Image (cartoon, rainbow, N blue to C red):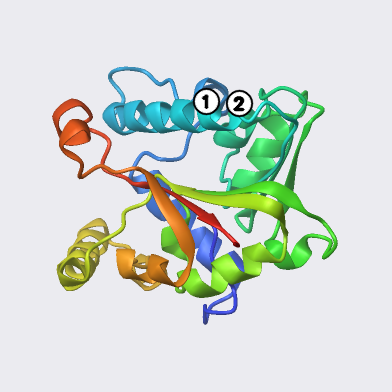
């Protein structure tokens, strides 16, 4: 989870309290023992199918980055409990930094993965990273929906991207323009049904059209005939953005 704090009216601590309570109601707050195992989870868990999809997206990303055959400096924005950052830290000679404003989850990541020397977890956002720091890969995994403006956060991320670096967005929904209003309404109804109406103010719906402002490619398209036939549980696109 990661929120652009320039856009929110309540304090980060108040948001975190609401966010964690909402996640607990959804059975999305995991024990240390579960986080170590993610994306593998008990087949009887309510979110097992979702984690199966995230496991596949993780493997696709690892294979893609591994095929670059060089050490990579990786930043994950909105790393949550750190499970994906930890998986990417297994890439040969690579280093990973995970950041998140959610102190509860970032503390869990620091605790659970403290034994890994090539990974660090830092509370806060881009503003807390040294301005001269550069990364070969910047990742938004299941986090871009918490930013009100893709244009703003991507341009902010560009300032930390190395030459020929890549931004990867995965595990988040994107919509065609004619789908946006119905998607927003579904979110309002969902959060109302859970008793966390405030969360709808921090969940943003992004259109594929916003990507037209950047050089990008869709590496995994859930709407392709092949993926619709064979990956029915993989609803999210995988998008790669480059600065030039």
Tell me if residue 207 can be seen.
no
Residue 133 percent across, percent down from the top left: 82, 56
Toward which corner of the image does residue 179 lie, by quadrant? bottom left
Residue in the picture at 37% in, 68% down: 204
C-alpha gap between disc 2 and disc 1: 5 Å
* Disc 2 secondary structure class: helix
Foreground residue, 73 or 241? 241
* Disc 1 secondary structure class: helix
- In the picture provided, is 143 more to the left or to the right than 157? left
- Placement of 81 over or under 211, stated as above or below: above
Toward which corner of the image does residue 235 lie, by quadrant? top left
* Discs 2, 1 touching: Cβ within 8 Å: yes
Foreground residue, 51 or 244? 244
- Residue furthest toward the bottom? 9
- In the picture provided, is 168 more to the left or to the right than 23? right
Tell me if residue 36 can be seen.
yes
Disc sitting over residue 63 in the figure: 1
Disc sitting over residue 86 in the figure: none
- In the picture provided, is 224 more to the left or to the right than 53? left
Q: Residues within 10 Å of mark 2 (few under 14, many from 20)?
A: some
In what quadrant of the picture does the C terminus appear? bottom right
Residue in the picture at 54% in, 28% down: 62
- Placement of 224 over or under 115, stated as above or below: below
Residue in the picture at 64% in, 38% down: 108
Residue 231 percent across, percent down from the top left: 23, 29
Disc sitting over residue 66 in the figure: 2
Residue 173 percent across, percent down from the top left: 31, 54
Residue 168 percent across, percent down from the top left: 52, 48
- Residue furthest toward the top? 43
């Amino acid at each position: 989870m990661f929120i652009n704090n320039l856009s929110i009216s309540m304090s980060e601590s108040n948001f975190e309290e609401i966010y964690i309570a909402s996640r607990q109601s959804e059975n999305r707050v995991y024990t240390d023992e579960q986080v170590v195992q993610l994306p593998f989870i008990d087949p009887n868990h309510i979110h097992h199918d979702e984690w199966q999809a995230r496991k596949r997206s993780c493997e696709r990303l690892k294979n893609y980055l591994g095929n670059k055959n060089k050490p990579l400096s990786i930043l994950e924005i909105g790393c949550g409990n750190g499970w994906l950052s930890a998986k990417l830290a297994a890439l040969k000679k690579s280093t990973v930094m995970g950041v998140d404003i959610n102190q509860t989850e970032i503390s869990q990541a620091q605790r659970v993965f403290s034994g890994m020397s090539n990974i660090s977890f830092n509370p806060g956002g881009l503003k807390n990273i040294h301005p001269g720091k550069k990364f070969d890969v910047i990742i938004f995994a299941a986090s871009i929906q918490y930013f009100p403006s893709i244009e703003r956060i991507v341009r902010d991320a560009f300032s930390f991207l190395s030459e020929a670096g890549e931004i990867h967005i995965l595990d988040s929904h994107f919509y065609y323009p004619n789908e946006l209003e119905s998607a927003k309404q579904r979110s309002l109804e969902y959060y109302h049904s859970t008793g966390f109406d405030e969360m709808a103010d921090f969940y943003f719906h992004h259109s594929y059209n916003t990507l037209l402002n950047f050089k990008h490619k869709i590496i995994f398209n859930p709407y392709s005939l092949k993926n619709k036939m064979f990956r029915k549980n993989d609803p999210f696109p995988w998008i790669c953005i480059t600065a030039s």
